[in-house]
Amino acid sequence: AFDKFGGITEDMLAPFQTEPFEVRFAPGEWGMFLYFNLEKDTPLQDVRVRQAIAHAVDREALLERVLFGFGEVGSPGFLPPANPFYNPNLPDYPFDLEAAKALLDEAGYDGAPIKLSYSTDWIMASPRVVEIIESGLSAVGIPIEHVVMDQASIDAAASQGDYEMMLVGYGGLGGDPDLMRRTFASASQMSGFARARGYHNPDFDALAAAQINLSDPAERRAALDEMQAILAQDLPVLPLYTTARVVVFNAGVFDNWYFTPGGWGGGIPMPYNKHQFITGMQTGLDIRS
C-alpha cells in the first residue's frame, strides 16, 4: 500500500496493472497547506493580499508537477472531497496574475517581503512546491524571504506561531469536520502545528460552536457548508492540494482490499477494515456463515 504523499507516477504503477496485480485508488485525506500567520504584523493581515496570493499560486501546476495528477487541487473551504461533508459549491481562486495584481493594488501593498518557512527534510516540501509558489508571487511583485529549517524545527515553529507564511502538511482530513472548529475557531484550545494563528471571524465562531450540538444531519451539513464558505472567503490558510491514496496488491493471494468510505482512525482512508478480515475468503466480500 502507498500512503500517497506524492511522487507516484503512471510508470511506477504500470507493472501492477496486469494480473495477478490490481490497483485501487481513493481520494486523499492528506493535504499540503500554505498557512498565513495573522498574529504577525505583515501584509498578510489584509484578506486581499491573501486572496491575491491564492490567485498567484498555480495549484494546477502543483497537481501536475508534484503529484503527477495523483491528487486534487485544494479546496479553499479546507475540507477535501474525501470528507463526507465536503462542500463542492465554493468560489475558487483560479491562477490569474492580473486578478492578483489588482487585489494587491486595491490593498495598497507596498512590496514588503514576506518570509516563507519550510523544511527540506520532508518530501512534500520539495523544491518544486517552493519554486511554483515563489514564481507566482514574484510575478505579481511579492518578494519572498526563504526560512529553511529541519523538520523538528519547522514543527516547533508552527506550534509556537514563529512564522509569517509556512508550508504545513498533515492528514486526517477525511474525519469528522469538527476539525474545522478545532483548527480555526477563536476559542479553540487546540495546540500544535495545524492551529491557524490569529484568525477571528465571529460568524465562523458561532457556526463552529453550534454545529457540535446539531443532531439533524441536514442542519449540521448546512452549518458546515457555511463554515467552508467563510474560510474560502477569509483564507486563513490556502489549501494547495490533497494527495490520492493508492494500494497495489496481488489479487491471486487476496482480493478484498478497498478503501473505507469516509476513512477510519481519524478520517484516514486506509485499505484496512474489519470487513475484509472477517470474510474468511480469499476472494469476494460475502461474510462466511
Image (cartoon, rainbow, N blue to C red):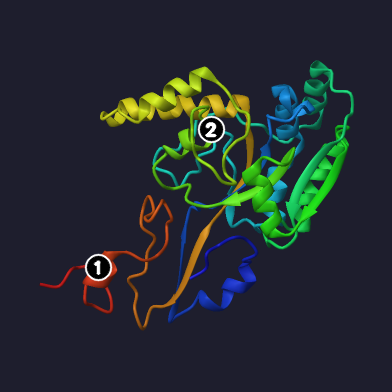
- Quick one: SS at disc 1? loop
Q: Residue 57: image x %, image y %?
A: 74, 40
- The numbered mark at residue 212 is none
Identity, as a three-letter code, of the amino acid under mark 2: Phe
- In the rendered image, which quarter is residue 141 located in? top right
Instruction: Using the image, determine if residue 1 lies above or below residue 45.
Output: below
Question: Does residue 157 appear in this view?
Answer: yes
Residue placed at 38% from the left, 50% from the top? 262
- Quick one: SS at disc 2? helix
Question: 262 or 188: which is nearer to us?
Answer: 188
- The numbered mark at residue 184 is 2
Residue placed at 38% from the left, 78% from the top? 251
Instruction: Using the image, determine if residue 148 lies above or below residue 93.
Output: below
Q: Nearer the viewer, mark 2 or mark 1?
A: 2
Q: Residue 15: image x %, image y %?
A: 56, 78
Question: 289 or 237: which is nearer to us?
Answer: 237
Kindly report the distance in space between the C-alpha atoms of the residues bearing marks 2 and 1: 40 Å
Residue corresponding to mark 1: 285
Mark 2 or mark 1, which has the lower sequence index? 2
Residue placed at 43% from the left, 23% from the top? 207
